[in-house]
Image (cartoon, rainbow, N blue to C red):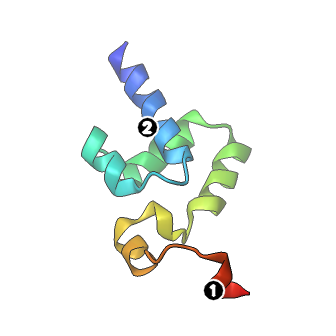
C-alpha cells in the first residue's frame, strides 16, 4: 500500500535529526503542521512528546535557520 509506505517514510524522515521539514515537503508534499499531525496519529503519546521536545526549536529541522549556523563544527574553535 503506497499510502502506508509514504506515511512510514514520512515518520522515518521526521524522526531523523538531519532531515528538514522543507525536505519532507519537497519529497512528500506535506507541510510541517501536516507532518506533526501524522506523527501524532502514528506514534505512541510518549514517543510523540519526546519527538516534539527534540525538534522544537531545533535549527536542523528548518533550512532557513540552518543556513545561519552553517559554519562547520571544529573542536579547536572551542579549546
Q: Position of residue 69 (x, y in %)?
A: 46, 78
Could you tell me which residue is drawn at 62 percent across and 37 percent down? 43
Q: CA distance from mark 1 to mark 2?
A: 36 Å
Q: Position of residue 68 (x, y in %)?
A: 40, 81
Seen as rendered, the residue at the extreme front is 76
The one of 10 and 63 positioned closer to us in this rendering: 63
On the question of residue 29 being in view, the answer is: no
Seen as rendered, the residue at the extreme top is 1
Q: How many marks?
A: 2
Disc 1, SS: helix
Could you tell me which residue is drawn at 36 percent across and 66 percent down? 63
Is 4 on the left or on the right of 51, as rendered?
A: left
Is 31 on the left or on the right of 18, as rendered?
A: left
- Give neighbour class at mark 1: few <14, some 14-19, many 20+ (Cα, 10 Å): few
Asked if the residues shown at circle 1 and circle 2 are in contact, with their CB atoms under 8 angstroms apart, the answer is no
Q: Position of residue 8 (x, y in %)?
A: 48, 28
Q: Please determine whether, in this image, residue 53 is positioned above or below residue 13.
A: below
Could you tell me which residue is drawn at 30 percent across and 48 percent down? 25
Q: Please determine whether, in this image, residue 49 is positioned above or below residue 73.
A: above
Task: Please tell me whether mark 1 or mark 2 is closer to you in this view.
Answer: 1
- Numbered label attached to residue 24: none
Place residue 29 in its image quadrant: top left
Sequence-first disc among 1 and 2: 2
Q: Position of residue 26 (x, y in %)?
A: 25, 47
Disc 2, SS: helix
- Give neighbour class at mark 2: few <14, some 14-19, many 20+ (Cα, 10 Å): many
Could you tell me which residue is drawn at 28 percent across and 41 percent down? 27
Q: Which residue is mark 1?
A: 77
Place residue 62 in its image quadrant: bottom left
- Numbered label attached to residue 10: 2
Amino acid at each position: 500500500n503506497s499510502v502506508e509506505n509514504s506515511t512510514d517514510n514520512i515518520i522515518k524522515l521526521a524522526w531523523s535529526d538531519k532531515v528538514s521539514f522543507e525536505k519532507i515537503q519537497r519529497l512528500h508534499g506535506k507541510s510541517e503542521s501536516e507532518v506533526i499531525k501524522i506523527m501524532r496519529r502514528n506514534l505512541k503519546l510518549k514517543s510523540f512528546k519526546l519527538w516534539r521536545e527534540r525538534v522544537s526549536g531545533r535549527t536542523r529541522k528548518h533550512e532557513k535557520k540552518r543556513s545561519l549556523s552553517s559554519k562547520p563544527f571544529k573542536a579547536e574553535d572551542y579549546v
